Image: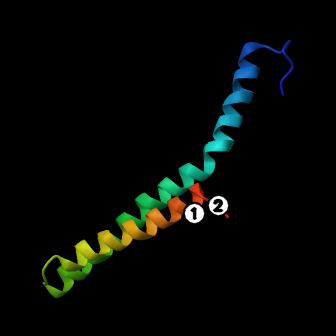
Amino acid sequence: MPDPKESYPNRSFYYFQQFLAKSGPAASASYALIGAVLVFALLGYFIDNHYQSSPWFTLGGTFLGLLVGFYQLAKAIWPK
């Protein structure tokens, strides 16, 4: 806890650091969600283009990315 006699910027940075430390797990989970969707969707896209198939791999990869990402988000929200 900062001393009340400290300058305003020092106290502000202290509380900002506390806020960032508390929001770290949620930020990490959201980045995992975005990353999982991008990786699996791009993987499906490249498989579809390589085999000249319909877009089912892209859709399946997007769905799989959403499942993995929301699983990571749920683990961050509801820890054991």
Task: Provide the secondary structure element on which disc 2 rests.
Answer: loop
**Is label 2 in contact with label 1 (beta carbons under 8 Å)?**
yes
Quadrant the C terminus occupies: bottom right
Residue that protrudes farthest toward the bottom in the picture: 51
Horizontal relation, residue 26 to residue 68: left or right:
right
Looking at the image, can residue 45 be seen?
no
Task: Provide the secondary structure element on which disc 1 rests.
Answer: helix
Q: Residue 25 placed where, x, y %?
A: 61, 52
> Which residue sits at x=83%, y=15%?
6
Report which quarter residue 22 is drawn in: top right
Horizontal relation, residue 31 to residue 9: left or right:
left
Report which quarter residue 11 is drawn in: top right
Report which quarter residue 7 is drawn in: top right
Residue 41 to residue 8: above or below:
below
Quadrant the N terminus occupies: top right
Horizontal relation, residue 23 to residue 29: left or right:
right
Q: How is the image coloured?
A: rainbow
Tell me if mark 2 has few (under 14), some (14-19) or many (20+) residues whose alpha carbon lies within 10 angstroms of its own. Answer: few
Distance between the alpha carbons at the discs numbered 2 and 1: 6 Å
Front in this rendered view, residue 10 or 28: 28
Reading the image, the residue beneath label 2 is 79
Tell me if mark 1 has few (under 14), some (14-19) or many (20+) residues whose alpha carbon lies within 10 angstroms of its own. Answer: some
What type is the residue that disc 2 sits on? Pro
> Which residue sits at x=62%, y=48%?
24
What type is the residue that disc 1 sits on? Lys
Q: Which mark is residue 75?
A: 1
Residue 59 to residue 79: above or below:
below
Q: Residue 10 placed where, x, y %?
A: 76, 21
Q: Which mark is residue 24?
A: none
